[in-house]
């Protein structure tokens, strides 16, 4: 039994004529007749009474099969429509993860632009440190994530595209005197101040501790273990200073930026599972993200020392649909 055979049968039932049914479907009448006969052979009973004096009529078996045939054809059409909508980005889902600073400095605007272009694609956002985000990607709980590279331990499981190179600077409250009389400070100078640091799982914590270790210094902690927003609020309140990415300063006028010397940089990448082909919705999100970065880079740019590494022309176009 095929959908084509069912479509021929429904057309015959609707118009009561092999000739008119074939014309409406754009096929030769002998072809339609053969296919309908094959369907009847498959089901083991005639569906159409060809000897009726009043033209074609459905047999009791045909009457019983007709509602099923209509339903099956409708379901098949619904399946085609659903797939076409997903391919055409009228439906679908993208599960995106990002670190808090990237949510503030980049992703909020990208999500707005994407939603305006594809309002029926469901967006799900997870905000966390890079390490938890990488684990979620590998477990299949996220489709894409903006993470710091290289991802620790399991980078072979991910495909990553570098997006940004951003500097890490010292945040202090504008309500207090600057940490130094200069616009920069060393880790040795930073070690004299009390730190507010995020919880485990934020690469920022490891980057800060490594900078201290490389300089032979021991950090003094004011508060440990906060989420990024809490860290920034505590700095604004004068609890301590923090090492943060430059992206956060654009939305925090109560924070003062002092650069570290030698400089600390980190690379942000868009990551996904290497063994899974990206969906059309994922590709569209990636295109939207890269286009947004290019527009910002061509304009006033990001605050502080943030460099865009990927351009829209470097995008790989979505593969053509298979002829099968």
Image (spheres, rainbow, N blue to C red):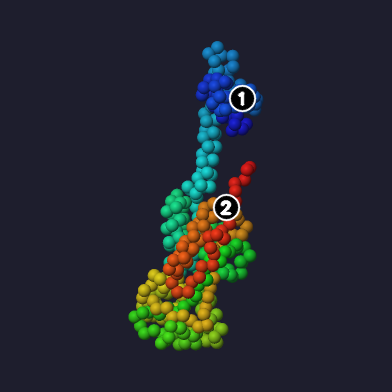
Please give the name of the residue rendered at 60% of the width and 54% of the height, measured from the top-left corner: 277
- Across and down, in percent, residue 44 comes to 64, 25
Q: Nearer the viewer, residue 122 or 290?
A: 290
Please give the name of the residue rendered at 44% of the width and 52% of the height, measured from the top-left corner: 117
Q: Nearer the viewer, residue 245 or 213?
A: 245
For the question of whether residue 45 can be seen, the reply is no
**In the image, farthest residue toward the top:** 53
Task: Pick the quarter of the image with the N terminus.
Answer: top right
Alpha carbon of mark 2 to alpha carbon of mark 1: how far? 38 Å
Name the residue carrying label 2.
318
Say what secondary structure mark 2 lies in: loop
Name the residue carrying label 1.
28
**In the image, farthest residue toward the front:** 298
Task: Pick the quarter of the image with the C terminus.
Answer: top right
Please give the name of the residue rendered at 53% of the width and 20% of the height, measured from the top-left corner: 16
Dot placed on the residue nearer the N-terminal end, 2 or 1: 1
Q: Is residue 6 left or right of residue 197?
A: right
Q: Are marks 2 and 1 in contact (CB under 8 Å)?
A: no
Structural crowding at the residue carrying mark 1, measured as other residues with C-alpha within 10 Å and reported as few (<14), some (14–19) or many (≥20): few
Say what secondary structure mark 1 lies in: loop
Please give the name of the residue rendered at 45% of the width and 74% of the height, measured from the top-left corner: 304
Looking at the rendering, which quadrant does residue 11 occupy? top right
- Across and down, in percent, residue 266 comes to 53, 73
- Across and down, in percent, residue 70 comes to 52, 30
For the question of whether residue 57 can be seen, the reply is yes
- Across and down, in percent, residue 94 comes to 50, 55
Tally of marks: 2
């Amino acid at each position: 039994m095929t959908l084509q055979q069912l479509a021929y049968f429904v057309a015959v039932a609707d118009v009561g004529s092999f000739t008119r049914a074939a014309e409406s479907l754009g096929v030769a009448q002998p072809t339609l007749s053969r296919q309908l006969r094959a369907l009847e052979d498959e089901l083991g009973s005639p569906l159409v009474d060809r000897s009726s004096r009043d033209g074609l009529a459905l047999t009791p078996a045909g009457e019983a099969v007709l509602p099923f045939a209509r339903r099956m054809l409708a379901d098949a059409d619904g399946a085609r429509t659903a797939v076409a909508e997903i391919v055409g980005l009228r439906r679908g889902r993208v599960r995106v993860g990002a670190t808090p600073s990237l949510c503030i400095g980049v992703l909020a605007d990208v999500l707005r632009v994407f939603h305006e272009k594809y309002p029926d694609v469901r967006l799900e956002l997870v905000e966390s440190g890079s390490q938890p985000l990488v684990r979620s990607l590998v477990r299949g709980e996220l489709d894409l994530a903006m993470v710091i590279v290289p991802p620790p331990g399991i980078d072979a499981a991910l495909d990553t595209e570098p997006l940004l190179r951003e500097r890490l600077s010292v945040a202090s409250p504008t309500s207090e005197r600057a940490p130094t009389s200069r616009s920069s400070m060393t880790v040795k100078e930073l070690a004299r101040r009390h730190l507010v640091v995020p919880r485990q799982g934020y690469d920022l914590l490891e980057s800060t501790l490594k900078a201290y270790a490389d300089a032979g210094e021991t950090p003094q902690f004011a508060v440990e273990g906060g989420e990024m927003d809490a860290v920034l609020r505590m700095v604004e309140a004068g609890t301590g200073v923090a090492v943060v990415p430059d992206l956060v300063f654009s939305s925090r006028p109560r924070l003062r930026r002092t650069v570290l010397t030698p400089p600390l940089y980190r690379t942000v990448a868009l990551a996904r599972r290497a063994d899974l082909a990206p969906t059309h919705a994922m590709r569209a999100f990636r295109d939207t993200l890269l286009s947004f970065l290019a527009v910002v880079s061509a304009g006033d740019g990001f605050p502080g020392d943030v460099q865009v590494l990927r351009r829209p022309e470097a995008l790989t176009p979505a593969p053509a649909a298979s002829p099968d």
